[in-house]
Image (tube, rainbow, N blue to C red):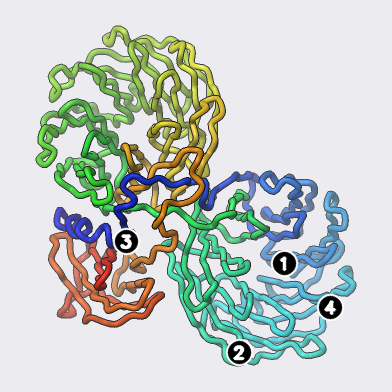
Amino acid sequence: MFALHRIALFTLCSGLFICSDSFAGDCIDYGNYINWIDSLYSGQIASRLESTDEYLYMTRDNHLDILDLADPDAPTVIGSVDLPNECNSIAVGGDYLYLSTDHQPSFVVVDISDPTTPTISTEVWLTGTTWDLAFFEDHLYLVNSSGHLYVFDVTDPTDPEEIADIDAFVNPTDIAVDENYVYVSSRSEGFFVLELDEFWTPTIIGFAPVWGLDLAVADGYAYMPWDYEVKVVDVTSPQSPQEVATEFLDERVYAVAAVGSRIFVSGWNLDVIDVSDPTDPVAIGKMHGFEDNTSHALVVLGDRIYVNAGGILSIFDASTVYSPDPVANLVLGNGTSYMEVRDDYAYIVDFGDGVYVIDISDPLQPFIVGYVETPNTTAEIELHGDHLYVSDLVWGIRVIDISDPTNPFIAGELNLGRRVRGFHAEGDILYATIEILGLQTYDISTPTAPAFLGRADIGNNAWDVKVTGSTAYVTDVDDGLFVVDVSDPVNPVIKGSVDVGAGQSSRLNQQGDVLYYTRGRELFALDVSNPIVPTVLSSVEASDALGRIAIGNDFVYLGAGASGLFVVNSANSAALAPVGYALPGNYASSVAVTDTHVLLTNGPGGLYVYPLQCGAAASAPVTGFSPTTRYLSAHPTPSRGAVTLNLDLAEPAVVDLEVFDTSGRRVWSAPSVFMGNGQSAVTWSGTDSRGVPLPSGIYVVRARTAERTFTTTAVLTR
């Protein structure tokens, strides 16, 4: 495994993320990138979304809500109506909404002339379930499960008149309409173009074997999300539509909206893709902000994006649609989690392996200098003197000697039979929060042999601990924050508590008289100038559950789960203010700050390095920091067989492709090949150079040009 990382390190700064010496001391303003604003909870399963300039129309199960957009960052429900069945699609036409429903009726017409009192005016029954519908110039077009495309004249919306029925498809699911053509997507057949005659009757004139889960058509191109990619189809010649590009993403996508030179797709995340050249789409922005990870509807209105997912309406600021890129990335093991940093070293826990020691003397080129395997799944970590105290999920505490960072080793153990969730070491005392047992103190005057001293019964779910002087602050996911007098470590005494509610993974950090505390998705600042009576000063909410807290000057940096790195302005602790996010993918848990950079652990993605947040004067990304960095990706991964390697080049080049196993041995290579700018794909069969299938495991893929080297990983499962 060690050699695996040395390969990744060797190629890092010219690889997945292009490094530059100018980044060594530069900063960026995270507020200048795409950002989450808020999420509204409906309490029911939300499915579809449509809009006008003034209103949003959102369905939840069999319920329609109309939301006023007078304040685009805080839509307010002003009207609602129950529908006969769950809604599959919404179209707006003047003072009426047309909604297809699951099963029957096929669609309903809702009068919204008074948005505060929407009323169903008509129900229409057809054979089969209507999947999608579109409105254009007093006509309604819909496709259903029986394979039909219907056209209705809705000049009188209260009395729709069927004028065409085209029975020519198998499972048509999505439809779009413009002045002359109807576009239909079938997940069983492909993509159809139909021409409209003078009587609004469509006739099939073109077909392409391209599939999608949604459909948007703009400026002569159709965009269709499918699994982990977005297909682009040229329809400028309607009789012969052609797939001209595919943009590969690192998560599933379900919905698409096209606005100007960009398309927005949502699924597990929200992605922004530049299609100013539709034949060469480029992903430029990414954000997460919907907790159930599945979004099936979105609309874009000006500089706001509204995403409907699983009972949550999420709102994003798209004034700038780019995402900040990391300046370095080091892939580690199976799943990086907690991290401690001191001087030139980062100590990182990997859930599946043990503890890595990383040299970060040059943050742009971090590399592994030491590793120690732990017998069980390692969880929490605390750095104190020449030792690390680490816990696993079930066993207790292990002491790792790091006096020589290049040769760490387990020097002591303490079997508790419980999971330790938090540590703090101060002087000769180790404070540990332990499930069921609460807060316990240990004498570590002999660092390798922690000896029990005392206990405070916090509750069953004590989580984190922070000690200042004779006061310990302990979080409990059920009961909030406790204040414990530890002037006598043998007899810690609970002195009080702060009711800030319950919340999973509650974390602590302190700067002067301000204690920072996370509860679920919220960060609190508390005044602890009187340590026994903390007072809440302010709070701020993130788009996902918050993890560890790092403090740097006037900013707080947090791991925000699926939303990545979250930056908060803490210059005024009485008015915490969100700044922005950076989303590398996977699941961010731990964060640390050096003099020049932010370090983020991110699940199987490993260690990511980002620039610091600039002060108030910052107004633009640093010079040379490209939001359109090209990359190498592998899909699918994990894979039981072949893997497609997608390389996105900024300019044409001769490329060498190689695959290495975890010992550093090259197992496969492709002949040098010339690739044009944009995306190219090469299939690796999952075999070695002789065609023999390779065993399950992690493999490093390397693509080299004369100017740059790109790396990524692929996982085989047999």
Mark yes or no: residue 585 visible. no
Distance between the alpha carbons at the discs numbered 2 and 1 = 31 Å
Under mark 1, the amino acid is Ser
> Which label sits in the foreground, 1 or 3?
3
Q: Mark 2 near mark 1, Cβ–Cβ under 8 Å?
A: no
Residue tagged 3: 16
Residue tagged 1: 100
Residue tagged 4: 153
Under mark 2, the amino acid is Ser
Residue 303, placed above or below residue 710? above
Q: Which of disc 3 and disc 1 is earlier in sequence? A: 3
Q: Which of disc 3 and disc 2 is earlier in sequence? A: 3
Disc 4, SS: strand
The disc at residue 237 is 2
Mark yes or no: residue 509 visible. yes
Q: Residue at x 33, y 65 (%)?
A: 637
